[in-house]
Amino acid sequence: MPWHPPGLVAGVDEAGRGPLAGPVVAAAVILDDLNPIAGLADSKKLTAARREALFDEIRAKALCCSIAEASVQEIDELNILQATMLAMRRAVMGLRLKPVLVLVDGNRIPVLDMQAEAIVKGDALVKAISAASILAKVHRDRWCERLHEQYPAYGFAGHKGYGTPAHLTALQAHGACPEHRRSFSPVAQVLAPSFF
């Protein structure tokens, strides 16, 4: 971890860059060193039940945390990378306490008014980033489950918006729903079928 003046360090991660539908979600977490949380890891390496349990524990024990989104409309207008940076910036700005250093999973940093560093595979290396990855993933998975109730034909509860064969088949059969990302090519192809 880079040297920084004494003060709070926030970890930031996102969920939902790859799916064909729904917002991209980012979370920022400042952990409490005096109140450690056991079992923090990259959210993708944990079971859904473990993520759910840790979600509640992080919310209870962290000094502060913030979850933010960039909408499907923002993704389509800006592109997925810029929308992800926007969600990350919103998550950091939403923290009740201001960190002196922000550690971001990956290789890019959103525009922030404090010191920040990108850490590749940070969700496996930095506990605060692991915690952020869990908050972002659980928040987005719950969003997909609610979307499934609205649009059961697509199977969002199962694939969480990713372009699985079942999802692509449903897209072909039913067209796109309002929460599909129009700028993603499998969705764009369904909306503008070729006339060959």
Image (cartoon, rainbow, N blue to C red):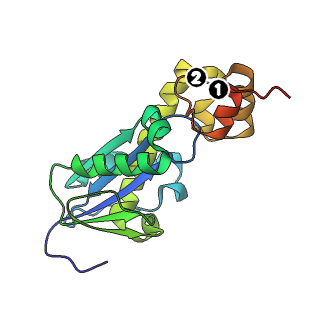
Give 175 or 111, whichever is nearer the viewer: 111
Q: Which residue is mark 2?
A: 177
Residue, x 47% and y 34% (percent of image)? 72
**How far from the left and from the top, in percent, is residue 153?**
65, 21
Amino acid type shown at disc 1:
Tyr
Q: Relative to 127, is 78 above or below?
A: above
Give 27 or 44, whichever is nearer the viewer: 27
Q: Is residue 38 visible?
A: no
**How far from the left and from the top, in percent, is residue 147?**
51, 26
Q: Secondary structure at mark 2?
A: loop
* Residue positioned most to the bottom: 3
Q: Residues within 10 Å of mark 1 (few under 14, many from 20)?
A: many
**How far from the left and from the top, in percent, is residue 96?**
16, 49
Q: Which mark is residue 154?
A: 1
Mark toward the start of the polypeptide (2 vs 1): 1
Amino acid type shown at disc 2:
Cys
Q: Relative to 74, is 136 above or below?
A: below
Q: Which mark is residue 5?
A: none
Q: Secondary structure at mark 1?
A: helix
Q: Is residue 1 visible?
A: yes
Where's the N terminus, which quadrant? bottom left
* Residue positioned most to the right: 196
Give 65 or 102, whichever is nearer the viewer: 102
Q: Is residue 11 left or right of residue 7?
A: right
